[in-house]
Image (cartoon, rainbow, N blue to C red):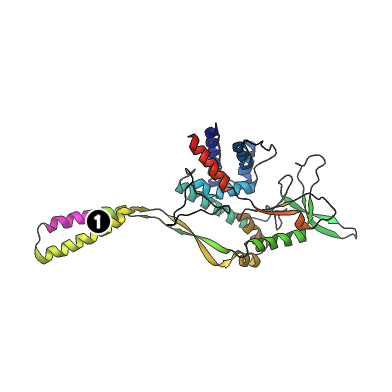
Amino acid sequence: MVARGAQRDADIRRAAIARAIAGQSFNEITDWLNSSGAVTPTNHRARLAGRDEDAGNVWMATTVRSMLMSALNRGHLVTREGSTVRNADGSPVLQGVALINDDTWRELQEALKRRAVEALQAPRRRDAHELLGVLVCHECGSNMHTAYRTEHDGTRAAVYRCNSVRHGRGIPKPTVTKATTVQWVHAEFVRRFGFMRQTQIVRTPGVDHRPEIAELEDNLEELGNRLAQLRGAAADVVVRQMNGIDARLTELRSVPVEPPKVQEVELDSTWGDAFLEAGDEERRQIMLAMSIRVTVGAPTGWRRPVEERLTFEVDRPDPEADALEEARHQAEL
């Protein structure tokens, strides 16, 4: 039963990856997952642990983004921050069977890269704001939207408010002051990530040595035929040539095909430098790319400080839980 469930979850992930490569947005994939009844990561872990599932738990775009970007899809063991754990020689530590092959992974990364560029170039949404997609309601998980509140002195203050219809009867929809919320979220990002160095993805094209191997083998055969007819110094020259070709063949045969490499290189600048120099939209994109999610809790008192109502999270999969899940799946095969 566990094996069948794990296989279905693997098929769902592959289908979501295929939809992303085909150009569907995170929101479109999220809607598809929810409409198809796909079990969420939270409920899947609850199911494996024998706990009750949360009927109200649904897929969110941030969860889908994290799932698609995770190296778990390649079978890699990852840290809590989502980075691949590597062996001493730089190769990734594997925790199970890869869901997709390297070519599909590269296609997925290119598709996600194109989507990020399109998002930056797209016309600004009418409801867009500095924290759209980052700031969500703790109760229902919906995006917070901008609105205005009339103060006692008659002035109007910009606020973020949950407008979702998914709140049950008697459950209040949270509202927080916009200026103090933006200030706190930006300051919290710099506090948590400002000291970390930025990274850049460097792609090295692959090399196929097989044509050169075939050519060298032909040369070696030709020189061997010539050597039988030579003596003295001429034979010594050919022997040295054959030894050089043989050494080169040994080297190439050890790795006849070098696949394309994707390397994460650390830059001199920090995330704090980049964040402080960026505009509001670039800051929002940085936080979205890092799967940052800030939830707004319900008001429990009169004008509580905003930092007491906000929760700053990195919404990435739990690699330890996924590793246990994969181990169970392998044991049932």
Residue 303 at x, y = what percent?
83, 56
Residue 25 shows in this picture: no
Counting other residues with Cα less than 10 Å from the Cα at mark 1, is it few (<14), some (14-19), or many (20 or more)? some
> Which quarter of the rendered picture does the N terminus lie within?
top right
| Residue appearing at x 49%, y 46% in the figure | 95
Using residue 233 as the reference point, say whether residue 134 is left or right of it: right
Using residue 8 as the reference point, say whether residue 235 is left or right of it: left
Asked if 44 appears above or below 114 in the picture, the reply is: above
- Find out whether residue 219 is within the magenta segment: yes
- Find out whether residue 93 is within the magenta segment: no
Using residue 142 as the reference point, say whether residue 290 is left or right of it: left
Residue 95 shows in this picture: yes
Residue 91 at x, y = what percent?
44, 54
> How many callouts does the rendering have?
1
- Judging by the rendered image, the residue that carries numbered circle 1 is 216
User: Extreme top residue here?
Assistant: 1
Using residue 32 as the reference point, say whether residue 149 is left or right of it: right
Q: Main secondary structure of the magenta part?
A: helix
Magenta stretch, residue numbers: 218-227
Residue 66 at x, y = what percent?
59, 49
Identify the element where label 1 is drawn: helix
Task: Place residue 165 in its image quadrant.
Answer: top right
Judging depth in this view, the residue of 164 and 325 nearest the camera is: 325
Residue 50 at x, y = what percent?
62, 35
| Residue appearing at x 68%, y 62% in the figure | 280
Judging depth in this view, the residue of 129 and 332 nearest the camera is: 332
| Residue appearing at x 84%, y 52% in the figure | 301
User: Extreme right residue here?
Assistant: 153
- The amino acid type found where label 1 is placed reads Leu
